Amino acid sequence: MADSRATAHAPAALGGPLVTPVTIVLAALALAALGVLVVRFTQGLGSVTHLNDGYPWGIWIAYDVVVGSAFACGGYAMALLAYIFNRGEYHALVRPALLASLFGYTLAAVSVIFDLGRWWNFWHIFWPGYAQVNSVMFEVALCISAYVLVMWIEFSPAFLDRIGLSRARQKLSRVLFFFIALGVLLPTMHQSSLGSLLVVFGHQVHPLWQSGWLLPLIYLITAVMLGFAVVIFEATASAVGFRRQLETPVLSRVCTIMYWVLIAYLVLRFADLGWRGALGSAFAATWQAFWFWAETACYAIPAVLLATPASRERPARLFVGAVLLMLGGMLLRINGFLVGYMTGDGWHYFPALPELVVTVGIIAFEILAYIVIVRRVPVLPAGQPAAR
Amino acid sequence: MGETFLEDVAASAVTIERRLGVSRREFMQFCAATAATLGLPAGAEAQIAKAVERAQRPSVIWLHFQECTGCTESLLRAEHPTLEKLILDVISLDYHETLMAAAGHQAEAARKAAMKAHKGKYVLVVEGAIPMRDNGIYCKVGGHTAMDLTRECAADAAAVIAIGSCASWGGMPSTDPNPTGASSVGQVLGKPVVTIPGCPPNPYNFLATVVHFLTFGSLPAVDELGRPKVAYGRIVHEHCERRAHFDAGRFALEFGDDGHRKGYCLYKLGCKGPETHANCSTIGFGDVGESNWPVACGHPCIGCTEKGIGFAKPIHAVAQLKGMSPPATYPRIVEQQGQTSFAAAAALAAIAGAAAGATAMLARNLGKSDAGQESPKASEPPRGQGG
């Protein structure tokens, strides 16, 4: 990264202990997930999941991949802001956001393998002749894999220094702009394609979430919005967790952008529902309607909470607003892929305990890896004295 | 090819109508069906149409020996409206004991005349097995043994086709103890010939072979037993309409039982589909639709095309599976439509509660710091909301 130009924000490793009660709990959760995965890979999907012929995709896809990759859009959103709109003041946020994205995306990509019935054939999608090039899933799979690779390259300056490959780093920095550009292009492609998956599902998706050709746009806008929300969430949580100074001024500027994206999204979403005549089904006494309003509340509350510039300066509001938006983005995806997915009479799906253990374990592993890396690798901006 | 082909056909439609007494539509249906039977690529029907239309009818000499005339009957009794017209018009059937008007010495004279006139160009079709024991005295026509007639007619023929299982490999007359020494055309001539086995064979397989000869001047590719690969390249079982029942383990166990009435697999009733090479399961039989071949009627295949199976194995004997066997386990018949466990619901509620609680705590601490305290209290990052 161009941290040499922004010496005030030059990142530095935090240091500090790696073994704490928090990391021990996180490691235990990750290990539990690993245990379930051993059973899954030896005994098959049916042994640990509640997947059935009506719901071949459960939370391992709907949460781990679709929501997981959207939550990992922090790096995308910040790169968009810092490099495409050339707003240097956000530079300090890029590297931590990129780190979280790196883990979010890598694990989302790996999660796909957990869900593949014949997982040993996973490489077929990369092999010309085996791959079905007209498939939306092919686009998503290839694009996400490419993005994971690009992100590792984007992030590599942070650890190339650490492992003493400074010359490699210098060579890389000359072509890094290319990877940064790719790092903005690729998520634009696959985050919208995740919406296209629902287009392909057609009438099997409840009208409240079947927006047809608008779905790619809806998924893309919410992914950008989620990216900003995640940056606020993560910057606040890590400031509190590592007892560092809050970065409220820069976060409130991020929040302003996020807020207008949110308003634009709400207008688009309800215009679409009204135009398609789907709004009526939101008032029916169904589970789908209930979850629709729960989802809508997650967008509406932040829209009120963060309405004034003064309110965007208050860390608590920023944090609650960001968490609610993340919840809303999650519900939009879970609702589209599971709650609003109607595959025929009699079919239903609720995740099994082992499925939840794996999902929680993946999240725990992400947080654990984040903690370990920021303590050992220059990621967070230096020069901020510990608050206490 | 499209346009010229269409123009050609349009121009000759009248000719065809006059000559064959069939409409152009029926004629093209015949050509397309024949091309499909032969497994030829799109456009081949045009070549076939041209060849048939040219009306250079090859002379055909059709010999009958130890047989029941079932092959001829199946060819003539086919319900397809144009079949018999075409087979009689496309070829010049100069000698056929069942169909020719001539009789006695007159008939034999016609054969001799045709053989002389079309020397090296006529097609010899043999129907029925040829007895070889005791110098072939068990079957004579016009004072000559079947053996001699076969050798005499084959000597100057452009192509020899054995129609039916009897001519192809001996068929029913060759069943043990085979008192007459019934043999195939190939055994008599000492060289392989094209065979169209079946009892009776599907008329389309014969017709397609003849049309292939007319169109391309050669006989279609055959396997080691002389059978055209297009028709006999696969076993009946491979494309059987009841195959899904076999794979799922649903069998009729006796005639008229519940499974039999439901159309289950006939393997356990002795169906020889798994060891018989023929295309009955793909093109049906008798030209009256897909429901009229033996297995579709509810009768197991008896393997009539296959030497050593048809007329050799008892009809009730279970077939030997070739290259496939029933799976060790079967898919569930009733699919689980979804389940919910209390533990999972409780765990999800706990995760949601923990996430909400952690968010609330952190927000409260942030609120306090916002209100003037110097720093937020340390708190672990909430789980449940991954970053």
Image: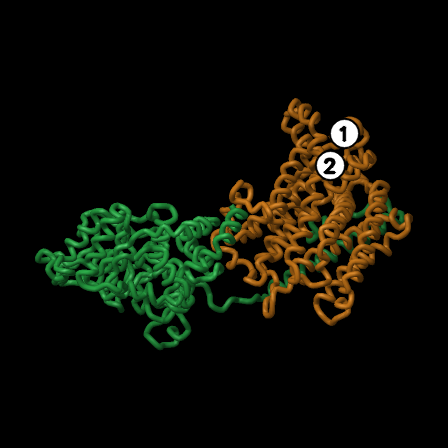
Chain colours: A orange, B green
Q: Which residue is mark 2?
A: A95
Q: In the current view of this chain or complex, which residue is farthest to the left?
A: B134
Q: Residues within 10 Å of mark 1 (few under 14, many from 20)?
A: some
- Front-most of residues B165 and B64: B64
Can the viewer see residue B248 in this picture?
no
- Front-most of residues B270 and A218: B270
Image spot of residue B168 (x, y percent): 24, 56
Can the viewer see residue A226 in this picture?
yes
> Would residue A315 be found to the left or right of residue B293 on screen?
right
> Would residue A189 be found to the left or right of residue A384 on screen?
left
Question: Earlier along the polypeptide chain: callout 2 or callout 1?
Answer: 1
Residue at 54%, 53% in the rendered image: A36
Image spot of residue A254 (x, y percent): 82, 43
- Residue B354 sits in which quadrant? bottom right
CB atoms of marks 2 and 1 within 8 Å: yes
Residue at 63%, 53% in the rendered image: A360
Residue at 74%, 53% in the rendered image: A214
> Would residue A99 be found to the left or right of residue B55 on screen?
right
- Residue A156 sits in which quadrant? top right
Q: Is residue B319 above or below residue A33?
A: below
**SS for callout 1:** loop
> Would residue B151 be found to the left or right of residue B235 on screen?
left
Quadrant of the rendering where the C terminus of chain A is positioned: top right
- Residue B353 sits in which quadrant? bottom right
Q: Are marks 2 and 1 on the same chain?
A: yes
Q: Which mark is residue A3?
A: 1
Name the amino acid, label 2: Arg
Which chain is indicated by disc 2? A
